[in-house]
Image (spheres, rainbow, N blue to C red):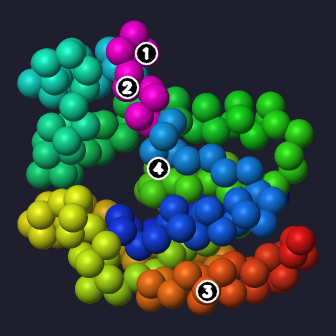
């Protein structure tokens, strides 16, 4: 079984995915795959550099994800372009990992699961819901408020994502509560270890 975890930035997707992982699911993180695809000498690096120019490079000629993020989160068309450059390769990497492993159960931490049609890669979708106040609280050390608002504005609204979700996990910052919800999902799926 392949379970996809999605939700907005700062909703707690990674925490929920790690709970599934502790229950025996092999974790695949789409952001980690994305970061590896834009390393020097990778095809993604060349594609992104060709599209966005050398202004996104740092002094070592690596793609500076912060500079790239500042560009794409200020322009929805540029974000769509970046996604169209990388997501086919991300999907391909995910398919390779799921075929290669003997583990039968996977959990995918994939922020743009629905937006990029990666929902075809999963059997069930778990949507992580979190209040805006909690999202800002989690992200305030990483980003200024204005950037968080821009990122949220460029993401698919929760109500739209809800149409695709098989399960919703409410993240109010209580890890025991999250674990209880995940165990309940596993019970419903007949996967409780």
Tell me the crowding category of disc 2: few under 14, some 14 to 19, or many 20 or more residues within 10 angstroms, Cα based: many
Compute the Cα span from label 1 to label 4.
21 Å
| Disc 4: which residue | 116
Q: From the top left corner, tell me how far across and down residue 141 is, in percent.
A: 21, 64
Relative side of 70 to 116, left or right = left
Point out the frontmost of discs 1 and 3. Answer: 3
Seen from the viewer's position, the closer of residues 102 and 140 is: 140
Residue carrying label 1: 42
Of circles 3 and 4, the one toward us is 3
How many angstroms separate mark 3 from mark 4 (CA)? Answer: 31 Å
Q: Tag 2 or tag 4, which sits nearer the N-term?
A: 2
Q: Earlier in the sequence, mark 1 or mark 3?
A: 1
Residue at the location (20% across, 37% down)? Answer: 68
In the figure, residue 148 lies in which quadrant?
Answer: bottom left
Any magenta on residue 35? yes
Q: Answer left or right for 83 relative to 30.
A: left
Residue 176 tag number: 3
Residue found at x 75% / y 81%: 183
Q: Secondary structure at mark 4?
A: loop
Disc on res. 86: none
Q: Tell me whether the residue at label 1 lies in contact with that at label 3, contact meaning CB atoms closer than 8 angstroms.
A: no
Residue at left 46%, top 71%? 12
Q: Are marks 1 and 2 in contact (CB under 8 Å)?
A: yes
Q: Is residue 123 visible?
A: no
Q: Give the residues in magenta.
A: 34-42
């Amino acid at each position: 079984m392949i379970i996809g975890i999605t939700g907005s930035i700062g909703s707690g997707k990674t925490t929920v995915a790690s709970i599934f992982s502790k229950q025996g699911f092999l974790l695949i993180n789409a952001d980690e795959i994305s970061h590896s695809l834009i390393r020097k000498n990778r095809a993604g690096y060349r594609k992104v550099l060709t599209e966005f120019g050398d202004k996104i490079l740092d002094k070592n000629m690596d793609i500076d994800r912060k500079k790239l993020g500042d560009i794409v989160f200020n322009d929805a068309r540029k974000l769509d372009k970046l996604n169209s450059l990388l997501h086919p390769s991300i999907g391909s990497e995910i398919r390779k990992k799921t075929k290669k492993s003997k583990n039968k159960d996977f959990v995918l931490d994939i922020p743009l699961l629905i937006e990029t049609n990666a929902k075809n890669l999963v059997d069930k979708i778990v949507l992580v819901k979190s209040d805006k106040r909690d999202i800002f609280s989690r992200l305030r050390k990483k980003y200024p408020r204005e950037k968080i608002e821009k990122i949220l504005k460029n993401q698919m609204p929760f109500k739209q994502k809800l149409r695709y979700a098989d399960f919703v996990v409410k993240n109010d910052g209580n890890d025991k509560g999250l674990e209880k919800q995940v165990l309940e999902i596993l019970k419903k799926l007949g996967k409780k270890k």
